[in-house]
Amino acid sequence: MKRPPKLAATPRSPAVTIDEGVVLAAGGQAEQRIAVATQWQLMWWRFRKHRLALGGTFVLVLFYLVSLFADFFAYTDPNESDAQRSLIAPQQIHWRDDGSFRPYVHALTGARDPLTFKRVYVPDPGKKVYLSFFASGEPYQFLGFIPMDRHLIGVQEGRAGDSLFLLGTDLQGRDMWSRLMYATQTSMTIGLVSVALSLVLGVVLGGVSGFFGGMIDTVIQRIIEILRSIPTIPLWMGLAAALPAEWSVVQVYFAITIIISLIGWTELARVVRGRFISLKEEDFVMAAELVGCSKSRIIFRHMVPSFISHIIAATTLAIPAIIISETSLSFLGLGLRPPAISWGVLLQDAQNIQALVISPWLLVPTIPVVVAVLAFNFMGDGIRDAADPYL
Amino acid sequence: MVAYIVRRLLLAVLTVWAISVLSFAIIHLPPGDYVTSYIASMSASGSAVSEGEAIAMREQLGLDQPITIQYAKWMGLMLQGNFGMAMEWGRPVSDVIGDRMSLTVVISVAAIIFTWAVALPIGIYSAVYRYSILDYAFTFIGFIGLAIPGFMLALIVMYIGFAYFGANVGGLFSPDYAEAPWSWARVWDLTLHLPIPAIVLGISGTAQLIRIMRSNLLDELRKPYVMTARARGLPEYRVILKYPVRVALNPFVSTIGYLLPYVVSGSIIVSLVLSLPTVGPLLLKALIAQDMFLAGTIVLLLGVLTVVGTFISDLLLMWVDPRIRLGQQ
Amino acid sequence: MSGDAKTLLSVRNLRTCFYQDEGTTKAVDGASFDVHEGKTLGIVGESGCGKSVTAQSILRIVEAPGRIVDGEILLTRPDGGVTDLVQQKPDGREMRAIRGGDIGLIFQEPMTSFSPVHTVGEQIIEAVLLHSKVSRKEARLRGIEVLKSVGIPKPERRIDEYSFELSGGLRQRAMIAAALSCNPRLLIADEPTTALDVTTQAQILDLLRTIQRERGMAIMLITHNLGVVAEMADDVVVMYLGRVVEQGDVDAIFHDPKHPYTKALLQSIPSIDSKPRIRLPTIQGSIPHPFNRPPGCPFHPRCTAFIAGRCDKEEPQLVPVGDGRQVSCFLYAPAAAGTAP
Ligand SMILES: Nc1ncnc2c1ncn2[C@@H]1O[C@H](COP(=O)(O)OP(=O)(O)O)[C@@H](O)[C@H]1O
Ligand SMILES: [Mg+2]
C-alpha cells in the first residue's frame, strides 16, 4: 500500500512536510549529504547499485571499443575470399606449449575428402602456428588517418589471413572473426545513428505535442497510434526493397538508417510528451515553489536533469529494437548489401540450413546481437530506475 | 459506449487509409511502372511487346493519369477484390496469395494464444511472489526471450531439429498434405505442426507480456480495494484472482492490439526461416522481383488484418471493462 | 470515562516491523490500548506514525515485508472467550471469520476502496455470503437493506452500479455499508473522512454516530484530525513514531494534555478564540522516519521539556497518571521507575 521508504534520497521529498496545521522544518543529520548532492550525483548513486546495469554498460563500452578499433581487433581483410577455404571449422587456441605460456593453434593442411573428393582443410596436430599479441599484420589507417599495422592477435610467421581462423570461415572462405569485428562496427553504429534520428523526430513531435496540447496534440497522438498499429516489417521491407540496386554501400547505409529510425520515434515521442505534461504539474516543482526556490533554479536543478535522464533511458531502450530491425532486414537481403558487413549480413549464410548443420559456427553472429540487446536493456532499465525510483 | 466505438472505428478507417497510401507508395516507389516490368518479364520469356502495345496498355491501366487518380482507381479495384496480376507468376494476385493469408492469420492467432497462455500465469506468479527465486528466474528468461529476435530463434530451432533429431521441424504440413485439398485430416496435420512456429513467434511477445502483466498486477496489488477485499475475510487466493488480477487483465486485453502488428511482422520473417506457407516468403519474393502489385496487396492485406484485430480487441476491452462501457475516461 | 464498559479488544505491546533491504522500519513499536464495547476510541498522530499499520495488524493483513514481531491482540468473542489474534494464521479459517465478521474495516480512500470492475453490490454480497449461510438472493436483499441503512437513496438500483458511478460521499457510505453488512462488533475506520469535502465529512461522521447508537458497535477511529477526535471519540490514544505516548478520555486529553507532544499538537490547531493572523506555534524539527528512530524517547529531539541525559538515553514507559489516564514521559515518571529495558 505504501511505497517502501527509499531513504530520503528522493528528489521529491523536500525538507518540508505539510500536515494538518503542523508545519515542520529542516531535515536531520543523515539527510545532509543527500541534500547537497546534485540530481546527477543522486542518479549515479542509484545507478551504481544496479548490478545488471553496470554489467550492461561495461559490455557496451567493450562493443563500442571494438566498433571504434575494428581494424585493430580484426586480423585480416574481412572480404578476402577463397573458395578453397570454405567452411573451415573454428580453431582451438592452445594456451600452453611445453609447460610455458605460448599460445598456438594447429596449422591446417589440405586433404581430399575420400567420399566427395572435395578439398577440405583439417587441423594438423604436428604443425603449430604460434600466436602473438599486438602483432604486426595488414596495414590499415588507425582511426581512419594514422597508418598502422598492429593487430590484437597475429601469427608469428606468415600471414594471419592464411593460417588463423579463430571462428572458422563462411561459405566463401572469409574469416568469421575479422568479419564479426567489422559487423560489430556497422551494426552498433547503425543503432546509434538511427536512434539519433529517432530522437530528433521523437523530441520534436513529442515536445510539440506535449507543449502545445490541444488540436496539435490530438493529431500527433493519432498519427502515432496509427503508426503503431501497422505491422512494421512488411512495410519496411517494401521501402527497403525500393532502394535502387545501384546505390553505393554508404547510400544504402544511410537509407536503411532512416527507414529504421522511423520505427523508434513513436515510443520516444510518447516519453517526451509524457514528461512535458507531467513537468508542468510535477509535485516537486510545486514543492520547490512553495519553499521559495527561484524558477530558473527549479528548471536547472530539478526539471532538466529529470527530463534528460528520462530521455536517455528511453533512447537506450529504443536501440535494441533498432539493432534487431537492421539485423532482420539485412538477414532478409533487403537491408545492408554485401560488401557491407553487419550482423544481419553475416547471418544470411545461416539461411542455408544444409550449410548450417555441418558448420554451426555460422550462428556465432547471433551471440553479439543477443548480448548487445540485453546490455542495452539492462543499462536502459538501470538509467530509468535511477532517474525515477518511483517508476 | 457508442462514442467509444465510433472513435475506435474512425481510427481503424483512418489507419486502413494510411496503410493503403503506404502500400500504394510501395507499388510506385521503384523506378518504372507495371508496364515496364511487364515488358521486362515478357521479353524474359521470349515474346516482345511493341511500343504501341505498351502505350495502349498504359492507357488502359490509367498509368498515364495523375497519381491521385491512379490511387483512387487502385483503391476501387482493391475494394472489388481485384488485386491485379502477379507478374512473376502470370496469375491474378488473389490466386497466388490463395490460403496463405488465412494461414498467416492461423499462425498469428496461435502465437497470441501461446503468448497469453504462458504470460498470464507467469506474470501473476511473478507479481504475487515478487523477488522470489522463480520471479528472478522468469525475469531472466524473459530478458533473454526479448533479446532473441524471432528469426534467430527459428534458425536455432531449425539447427537443433536437423542436427540432433535429423528432422525438418519447419513447414506447416507433412509432405502428404502440403498440396492436398482441405480435409479434417489436413486440419489435424496443421494442428500438429503449429506449436513450433507458434512458440518461436510468440516467445518475445511472451517476454514482454510477462513484464506488462507483472507490473500491472503490482500496481493493482498496491491499491486499497485489495486490502478491503482481504479485510472482508476472503481467502487470499480469491482476493488475488478475483480482484487485482481481474483489473490487471483489462490493459492486458488491450495488448492484443499492440501484439498483433508485432506478431504479424514477426511471422513474415520467421516463416521464411521455417519455410511456412504464409504470405511472408511470397512477400519477400515479390519485393526482390519487384512484383509490386503482389507486394503492395500483401502489405495492404496484412495492415487491414491487424487493424481488424485491433478493433476486435478494442471491443473486447469494452466488454470486460465497465469503465469504458459506461463512458468513464 | 469508560472504565465501566467491557473491553472488546485489547492491544498489548504490539510491535510490527517492515524488513527491507535498506533496513528495518519499526512501524508500530510497542503500542498498547483497549477498545471498549459500544465506545469510540480515537487514535491520533501525524501521518507515518503507524496508525494504519496498527489497524492492519489487528486484522492480520499487514503486507510483506511487514510482520508482527511481538505483542498480543486480544479479542473478546461473543461467547466470552478471548482469542489472541497474533497467534492466528493470517489466512486461516478463524482469522478470516473474524475479518469482516467480527471486525469491519473502512478506508481513507473511497475512490479506490472498491474494485473498479465489480459492482458495489457484488462486493457487499460477497461479504454476506462469506460470513453467513444465506442464499445469493437473501444476501442481495441484505445488501440492499444495509445500503439503505447508511442513507443511500434507491439502494435497489445502486447495488448494481459501479463505484465510479457514485459520488465521493455515496461511495464512502457504500464502503461503510460493506463493512457493516455482517454486523461487526468492532468497526475500524481508518481516516474515513480525510478524502471528503467538509460537508460530506460531517454527514459521514453523523452516520457513524447514528450507526453506533443503533447497533451498539465499538468504533476505532483513526485520524490525524484532532477536530474529528474531539467530536467523535470517547477515549483517545495519541501515537508518535509507532508508540502510544498518551491515552485517556477525550475531555481529559483536550483540557489537560500531559505529554509535551500532545500539548504541542493541541497548540498547533487554530481555534476560534485565537487571534487572527498570528503564526501558529509549530513543532520543532521533522518527524524522523521510523527507520532511523532516535534513541531514548523518540520525541526527545523535538521536545521542549527535554531532560538531557535521560530522555535521549532511556525509553519511557506508559505509566498511569490517575483517572485511568496513561502517559509515556519522564516528566511523569518517578526517577527510579523509568529505567530502560
Ligand atoms: N507496505 C509497507 N512497506 C514498507 N513500509 C511501510 C508499509 N506500510 C507502512 N509502512 C511504514 O510504516 C510506517 C507507518 O505507516 P502508517 O501506519 O501507514 O502511518 P499512518 O499513521 O499515517 O497511517 C511508515 O513509516 C511507513 O513508511
Ligand atoms: Mg494511514
Image (cartoon, coloured by chain):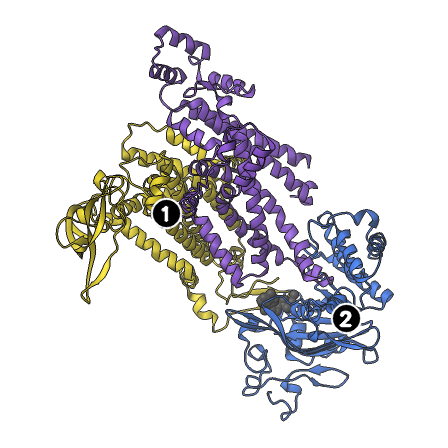
Q: Is residue B297 visible?
A: yes
Q: Residue at x 64, y 32 (%)?
A: B6
Residue that sits furthest to the bottom in the current view: C336
Q: Callout 2: residue from which chain?
A: C
Q: Where's residue B190, x and y in %?
A: 54, 36
- Position of C57 relative to C162 (above/below): below
The disc placed on residue C233 is 2
From the rendered image, report the letter of the chain displayed in blue.
Answer: C
The secondary element bearing badge 1 is classed as: helix
* Residue A91 in the figure: left or right of residue B177: left
Q: Where's residue C204, x and y in %?
A: 77, 59
Residue identifier under label 1: A366
Q: Nearer the viewer, mark 1 or mark 2?
A: 1
- Label total for image: 2
Mark 2 neighbour class, 10 Å CA radius: few under 14, some 14 to 19, many 20 or more: many
Q: Where's residue C55, x and y in %?
A: 69, 69
Q: Nearer the viewer, residue C310 or B173?
A: B173
Which colour is chain B painted?
purple
Mark 1 neighbour class, 10 Å CA radius: few under 14, some 14 to 19, many 20 or more: many
The disc placed on residue A77 is none
Which colour is chain A painted?
yellow
Q: Quadrant of ligand 2?
A: bottom right
Q: Residue at x 59, y 59 (%)?
A: B128
